[in-house]
Image (cartoon, helix red, strand yellow):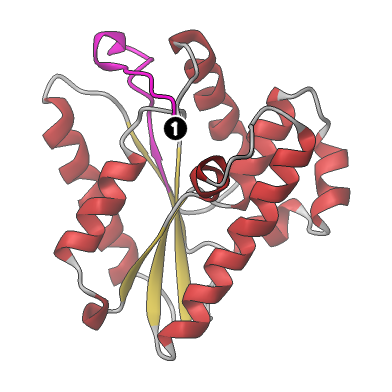
Amino acid sequence: MPFTSVISRIALTGGPGGGKTSLLSLVAERAPTSAGLFAVPEAATVLIRAGLVPGSFSFQRAVFHLQLSLENAVAEATEREGVLVCDRGTLDSLAYWRLLGGSEEGFWEFSGMTREEHLARYLGVIHLETAAVGASEHYTRSEIGRPEPPEEAARIDSLCRSAWEGHPNRVFIPNTPGGWSEKLERAWAAVGGMMEHRVL
């Protein structure tokens, strides 16, 4: 499937504690905006810091709308060709929607988009496996953005994999014996590979 927009998007997905935020920081550090690579923060964290409490359909609807707004705002502000690396994408909202017990059909209706339309928004998807799967000793919880216990983090990870099923350009980055630094370098290489093969 060709992606012909001047602005391309790469979604970072996976359960909590997988390294998405760390990778986004790496993107900001290694690729200044002059290189045409832009980091889009996680919508849920923005809302939590604003004082909203996660765990409801209303919160997830707000996450979805803010996700779209953040992506569109950054894309508009670039005023040129570029790649947005997004801490989660619109189909991550489907994963959390299902975690709350919602149906896929209900999500398509709410979002006003089909699965195919969601998938087509993104040049590629990089799934960073949560540390709660196979590396639980490295999984840490925090009050901002990651209150989930390891069991729930692992379930979210699985739901994220299912949500993005069907995307033609997905890369899965598992937890490996090489540790955190190796995982981030593999994810960074995946970002570079997707940039090289995009269609303008």
Question: What residue lies at 26% left-to-right and 43% top-to-bottom?
Answer: 22
The percent coordinates of residue 123 (x first, y second) are 47, 64
- In this view, the residue farthest toward the front is 51
Residue 34 in view, yes or no: yes
The magenta stretch spans residue 5: no
Q: Which residues are magenta?
A: 126-144
The residue nearer to you, when weighing 152 against 47, is 47
- The chief SS type of the magenta part is loop
From the viewer's perspective, tell me whether residue 12 is left or right of residue 112: left
The residue nearer to you, when weighing 24 against 189, is 24
Q: Quadrant of the C terminus?
A: bottom left
Question: What residue lies at 50% left-to-right and 26% top-to-bottom?
Answer: 157
Classify 21 as above or below 31.
above
Q: Which residue is mark 1?
A: 144
The percent coordinates of residue 114 (x first, y second) are 78, 55
Question: What residue lies at 54% left-to-right and 65% top-to-bottom?
Answer: 70
Amino acid of disc 1? Ile
The magenta stretch spans residue 135: yes
- In this view, the residue farthest toward the bottom is 79
From the viewer's perspective, tell me whether residue 2 is left or right of residue 62: left
